Each structure stands twice: as C-alpha cells, then as structure tokens.
Amino acid sequence: MQTEVSKSVNKKVLIVEDNELNLKLFTDLLRAHGYTIEPLRDGREALAKAREFAPDMVIMDIQMPHVSGLDLIEQMQGDAVLATIPVLAVTAYAGKGDEERILGAGARGYLSKPVGMAQFLAAVKAIVG
Ligand code: MN
C-alpha cells in the first residue's frame, strides 16, 4: 500500500530562496513529506545547480539579491533542458500585475508570502505529485 509520503519519494525539488528562515521551513516541510531537496541561498548558482541536480521542479523566490527570480525563470525558459522543469514562484510582493508577469515569464504556479504550509504543500503536489 502506498502512502502519501512514499509517492513523493524520488521527487527532487530545488529550492532557491535567500531568506534563511523560509528556506529552512520549505526544506524541512518537503523533506518530512519524502521529497529530496536541494536548498540554495544564492540565486546566481540556480541555473548551474538546476542542470546538476536535475530537479522535478524548482521553487523560486522572486526577491533576491544579485538576481531576481523573475530573471531566473526567464533564463530557464530560454534553455532547452531547463525550460522543461516546472517552477513554483514565491514572492513577498503580490501587487497587481505580479502574478501575470511571473506566469508570463513561464512559472507554472505562484504563491504570495506569507505562505501557509498547507497551501505550499498543496501547490507543490499539484505540480510534481
Ligand atoms: Mn527573498
């Protein structure tokens, strides 16, 4: 009999998030549900890490120093391999137009902070199972 947890085993998620607390919350929650997580604080390493880790999905913070998650999503869309990886964006600023811009850049989904843990998990499962 398969459990909820065993279904998500072997699903790999790259989390790109500069905020330590959010990174830990997202990482701990998904690990507790059986996902294999690669946490990454520096967005500048995101594309190289995505190529190396080959995740089933990416969780992408939008507001980061050095490089925005929006730019990274656009860069992923321009790469033959990375364009196939679904991205769930998370952002602190849910201004009108943000969602359109983020989804327009190629993100599969969008959550505004503060993100409830149940909502977060549901959004991940909706994308990657
Ligand atoms: Mn941030």
Image (spheres, rainbow, N blue to C red):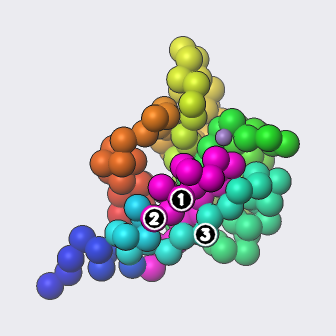
* 113 or 3, nearer to the observer: 113
Label 3 vs label 2: CA separation?
Answer: 11 Å
Q: Is residue 99 above or below residue 123?
A: above
| Residue 21 covered by magenta stretch | yes
Which amino acid, by three-letter code, is at mark 2? Answer: Asp
Side of 28 relative to 54 (left or right)? left
Residue 101 pos. (x, y %): 62, 26
Please tell me how crowded label 1 is: few (under 14), some (14-19), or many (20+) other residues with Cα within 10 Å: some
Q: Which label lies toward us, 3 or 1?
A: 1
Which picture quadrant has residue 104?
Answer: top right
Residue 38's disc is 3
Point out the image quarter for the N terminus. bottom left
* 37 or 1, nearer to the observer: 37
Which amino acid, by three-letter code, is at mark 3? Answer: Glu
Residue 28's disc is 2
Which amino acid, by three-letter code, is at mark 1? Answer: Lys
Helix, strand or loop under label 3: strand
Residue 88's disc is none
| Residue 104 covered by magenta stretch | no
- Which residue is painted at 45% across and 65% down in the image? 28
Tell me whether circle 2 and circle 1 mark residues in contact (CB < 8 Å): yes
